[in-house]
Image (cartoon, rainbow, N blue to C red):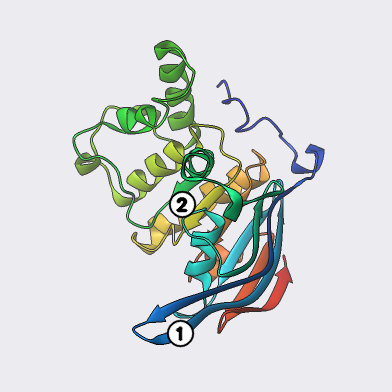
Amino acid sequence: MEIPEQVGKYKNVEMMLVTTIVEAVDLKKTYMLGKVPVNALRGVNLKVESGDFLAILGPSGSGKSTLLNLIGALDKPTEGNMLIEGVDVSTLNENQLADLRRRIGFVFQFFNLIPRFTARENVELSMAIAALSKADRRRRTEDLLETVGLRERMNHRPAELSGGEQQRVAIARALANNPKFLLMDEPTGNIDSKTASEIIGLIKRLSEEKGVTIIMVTHDQRLAGQAKRIVQMFDGLIVQEVMN
């Protein structure tokens, strides 16, 4: 199998040039609930290096979803700085933000596939604005679907795929444009435990064998246990960090 460029470029993560991909500096975020301020983040400091696999754990209301939104450039902090490869997200205009988001691979709990499109079309569509020929897009799509174990299912629509297969399509789609990193929001939250184990295995393989940088919010202790680093959030702060 031809491994897609970037994905699988490094068979050993230690061979990669380590650079800081994401850096949060004294990150604070306050929302207004009516007239009442809610401090969702109260001074978060975090670094994610290339090839890292980070799990963010925390109860509801701990700030992990807010942090995820800031890392994904879907929101801006009230105070502090969110840096993506050294660039402060708050300094970017809307066009620059849109371009940055295109270079982040998002994987959501509910898949967000287009129902009338096949698995192949869902992945290929994400490369529509890339400077690739139709043949190159088709070849890369097939390579990605093979990477996630779906080469034989690429012409099936989402309704014809299991939940785990749909999540695999979503992961392939997220990898399509050689993202800076994958940002995963509860990737096993909408599938059964057996299928979740298969997705956990796939995510770990992407990290260990392919060198993909992964930042993941999860409540799944088994999934978090596969990460290289675990940060525990509570009340808007990182209260603990564990290396696996």
Q: Based on the displayed image, in which of its 4 quarters is residue 189 positioned?
A: bottom left
Q: In the depicted view, which residue is nearer to us: 78 or 182?
A: 78
Which residue: 59% across, 43% down? Answer: 206
Secondary element type, mark 2: helix
Q: Position of residue 229 (x, y in %)?
A: 69, 63
Which comes before the other along the chain, label 2 or label 1? 1
- Residue 37: assigned label: 1
Residue density around tag 1, few if under 14, some if 14–19, many if 20 or more, within 10 Å: few
Q: Which image quarter is the C terminus in?
A: bottom right
Q: Is residue 8 left or right of residue 165?
A: right
- Residue 198: assigned label: 2
Which residue: 40% across, 54% down? Answer: 108
Q: Position of residue 16 (x, y in %)?
A: 78, 38
User: CA separation, marks 2 and 1?
Assistant: 41 Å
Q: Which amino acid, by three-letter code, is at mark 2?
A: Glu
Residue 58 vertical placement versus 172 (above, below)? below
Q: Based on the displayed image, in which of its 4 quarters is residue 48 positioned?
A: bottom right
**Can residue 171 be seen from the camera position used here?**
yes
Q: In the depicted view, which residue is nearer to us: 3 or 65?
A: 65
Q: Which amino acid, by three-letter code, is at mark 1?
A: Pro
Q: Is residue 161 left or right of residue 183?
A: left
Of all residues, the one furthest to the bottom in this rendering is 36
Secondary element type, mark 1: strand
- Residue 79: assigned label: none
Residue 241 vertical placement versus 138 (above, below)? below
